Image: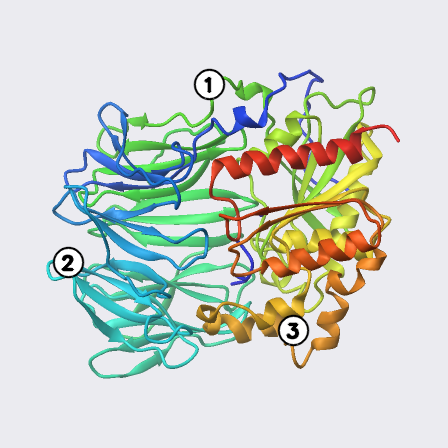
């Protein structure tokens, strides 16, 4: 997978007909009275859900009573966000994860019923990640780089003693992906490139390593059945899209369990294997299949009225299911579904009641031809007020990655800007995930060139719409999208009237040399795609905007987190200095308490208000 800097002509599908209306004008503060919710873990008695929510301004832990949907705040952090992991089995204690100021050095914490919080992985530079409960639920597995910052070893922690034991030591470019229920087998992957890896099963007792990856492709573990008779994995070996494979651990035979003409994103079995969940990435939107493994029938889920089922979690009793459901017009909401009664109960209302969802816009999937005739998928947002008689400015939005994907879903910044009269085309340029492995690999070592041309042809598609101000189109992106923004402003300086770079790379030589040590297992694969900073230094120099800043003509805005471990602040400092030296209008904001992306509402409000003011100045005001 392309995991590097994440973290967002013709039309083959007709645009939805929309009447021209004047929506109510909302402030950025109103958009951030919305609430974001993550997680949703059932308590041992299954009467509550443990979630993370930024209702308090940053993410804290909350419990939701399933019977009455009442939400109670459990933690009260003011500085660092807390993200729920799970309830400790057979107790009301909880596990959660947190870092410091966005530095991505996550630790695992235990929060007890009495309010005491203990850091279970207290190493100063230790990065730890929960990896599941052991078979008898007396402890949990986790991966940690406390022994060596480059590698993540597997540990098991006993909850009673709170002592951990190393289960598997990583000594090469391997990553632990899964553990069998009996704790004997490990699923391991080894990165080759960002579009190819190896998959192995390792027996901790016999020390035998078995490779399951028979050809160059992508492979990811997808769990074991309850009796450890079968192992499941997802791969695009021998096909364009990823399918679900069942591997018989006794006969060593593989069978294709499920495939379609889109990628299987994930799949897992419920606690006692009664239900099989399959998530499909269908044209930028989730499609979900839940099968009853005992009857072979699909569960008939309620009609979601074209909403996006982002994720689900089935309770241990297999009687209830939490659904996370999203739409372009509102942040994700949580529901609970009762398998026996078929009842679907909504637990949250995340959209600010001051905002009328009808004033917001739906996301439309469109396609256009790029410079070489390749069909490029994109997600389009057309302002209600746009018409041939009321032309509006527009933005090309570029996702992160580089192998990310813009998807149908809610974005406060996108809806805020569209509400203010900006049309937005979120381009899934070549190299994006979700459209097959051929499309995914098309940008390898061509970054800032052919993928940038896809964005420029997206601009041309916008210009063909009779309600767009053809000369008032900018470009915006975060992370790798921030790099694409700067590449556009630098290497094609006449194409976009303004650019907004959010946490974006400007010097590939420095970024690739300074990647965090805990990315060691991925480093060679990253170099294979992007280029080696030593062997490919000339090519990386040529595609780094910093070294060609004298070519920039039009205004740029740069946003940066001071604690960003991926794109160091010095990169943004240098590009801003270079632009100022060349008298290019530039606005620069550094957030001292953020890393690679925004966590705090107050920072997002400040940033997004200033983005809108910057765009208004250069894309709306008359010259």
How crowded is the residue under tag 3: few (<14 C-alpha within 10 Å), some, or many (20+)? many
- Whole-angstrom CA distance, mark 3 to mark 1, is 48 Å
Query: Residue 314, position in %: x, y?
Result: 27, 43
In the foreground, 309 or 44: 44
Query: Residue 459, position in %: x, y?
Result: 78, 43
619 relative to 46 in the view: left or right: right
Q: Earlier in the sequence, mark 1 or mark 2?
A: 2
Who's the residue at 63% across and 63% down the image? 438
Task: Say what secondary structure mark 2 lies in.
Answer: loop
Q: Earlier in the sequence, mark 2 or mark 3?
A: 2
The image's mark for residue 448 is none
- Whole-angstrom CA distance, mark 1 to mark 2, is 42 Å
Measured along the vertical axis of the image, is residue 518 above or below residue 118? Answer: below
- Whole-angstrom CA distance, mark 2 to mark 3, is 44 Å
Where is residue 39, by image quadrant? top left
Q: Considering the image in quadrants, where does the C terminus appear?
A: top right
Disc 1 target residue: 353
The image's mark for residue 531 is 3
Residue 225 seen in the current view = yes
In the foreground, 254 or 540: 540
Disc 2 target residue: 159
Task: Say what secondary structure mark 1 lies in.
Answer: loop
Q: Nearer the viewer, mark 2 or mark 3?
A: 2
How many numbered marks appear? Answer: 3
55 relative to 180 in the view: left or right: right
Task: Say what secondary structure mark 3 lies in.
Answer: loop
Measured along the vertical axis of the image, is residue 221 above or below residue 612? Answer: below
Measured along the vertical axis of the image, is residue 110 above or below residue 515? Answer: above
How crowded is the residue under tag 2: few (<14 C-alpha within 10 Å), some, or many (20+)? some
């Amino acid at each position: 997978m392309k995991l590097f800097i994440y973290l967002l002509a013709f039309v083959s599908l007709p645009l939805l007909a929309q009447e021209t209306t004047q929506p109510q004008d909302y402030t950025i503060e109103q958009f951030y009275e919305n609430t974001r919710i993550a997680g949703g873990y059932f308590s041992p008695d299954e009467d509550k859900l443990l979630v993370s929510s930024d209702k308090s301004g940053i993410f804290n832990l909350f419990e939701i009573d399933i019977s009455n949907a009442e939400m109670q705040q459990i933690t009260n952090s003011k500085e660092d966000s807390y993200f729920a992991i799970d309830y400790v089995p057979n107790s009301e204690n909880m596990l959660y994860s947190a870092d410091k100021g966005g530095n991505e050095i996550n630790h695992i914490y235990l929060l007890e019923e009495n309010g005491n919080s203990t850091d279970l992985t207290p190493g100063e530079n230790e990065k730890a990640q929960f990896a599941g409960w052991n078979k008898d639920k007396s402890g949990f597995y986790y991966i940690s780089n406390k022994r060596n910052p480059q590698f993540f070893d597997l540990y098991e922690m006993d909850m009673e003693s709170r002592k951990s034991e190393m289960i598997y030591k990583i000594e090469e470019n391997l990553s632990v992906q899964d553990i069998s229920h009996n704790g004997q087998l490990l699923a391991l992957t080894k990165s080759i490139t960002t579009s190819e890896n190896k998959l192995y099963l390792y027996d901790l007792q016999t020390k035998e390593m078995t490779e399951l990856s028979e050809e160059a492709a992508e492979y990811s573990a997808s769990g074991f059945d309850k009796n450890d008779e079968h192992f499941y994995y997802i791969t695009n070996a021998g096909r364009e899209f990823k399918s679900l494979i069942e591997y018989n651990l006794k006969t060593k035979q593989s069978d294709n369990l499920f495939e379609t003409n889109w990628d299987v994103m994930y799949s897992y079995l419920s606690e006692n294997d009664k239900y099989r969940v399959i998530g499909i990435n269908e044209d930028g939107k989730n499609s979900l299949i839940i099968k009853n493994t005992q009857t072979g029938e699909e569960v008939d889920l309620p009609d979601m009225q074209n909403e996006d089922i982002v994720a689900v979690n089935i309770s241990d009793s297999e009687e209830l299911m939490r659904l996370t459901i999203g739409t372009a017009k509102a942040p994700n909401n949580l529901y609970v579904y009762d398998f026996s009664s078929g009842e679907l109960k909504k637990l949250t209302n995340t959209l600010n009641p001051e905002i009328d969802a009808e004033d917001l816009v739906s996301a439309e999937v469109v396609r256009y031809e790029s410079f070489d005739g390749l069909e490029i998928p994109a997600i389009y947002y057309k302002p209600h007020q746009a018409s041939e008689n009321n032309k509006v400015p527009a933005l090309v939005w570029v996702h992160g990655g580089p192998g990310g994907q813009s998807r149908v879903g809610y974005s406060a910044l996108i809806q805020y800007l569209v509400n203010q009269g900006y049309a937005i085309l979120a381009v899934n340029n070549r190299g994006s995930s979700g459209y097959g492995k051929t499309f995914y690999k098309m940008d390898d070592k061509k970054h800032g060139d052919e993928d940038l041309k896809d964005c420029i042809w997206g601009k041309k598609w916008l210009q063909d719409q009779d309600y767009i101000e053809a000369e008032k189109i900018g470009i915006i992106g975060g992370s790798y999208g921030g790099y694409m923004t700067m590449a556009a402003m630098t290497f094609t300086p006449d194409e976009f009237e303004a650019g907004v770079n959010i946490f974006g790379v400007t010097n590939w030589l420095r970024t690739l040399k300074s990647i965090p040590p805990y990315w060691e297992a991925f480093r060679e694969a990253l170099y294979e795609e992007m280029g080696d900073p030593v062997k490919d230094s000339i090519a990386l120099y040529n595609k780094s905007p910093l070294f060609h800043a004298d070519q920039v003509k039009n205004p740029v805005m740069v946003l940066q987190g001071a604690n960003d471990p991926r794109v160091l602040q010095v990169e943004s400092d240098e590009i801003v200095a270079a632009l100022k030296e060349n008298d290019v209008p530039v606005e620069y904001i550094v957030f001292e308490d953020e890393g690679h992306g925004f966590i705090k509402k107050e920072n997002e409000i400040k940033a997004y208000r200033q983005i809108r003011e910057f765009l208004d100045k250069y894309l709306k005001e008359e010259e």
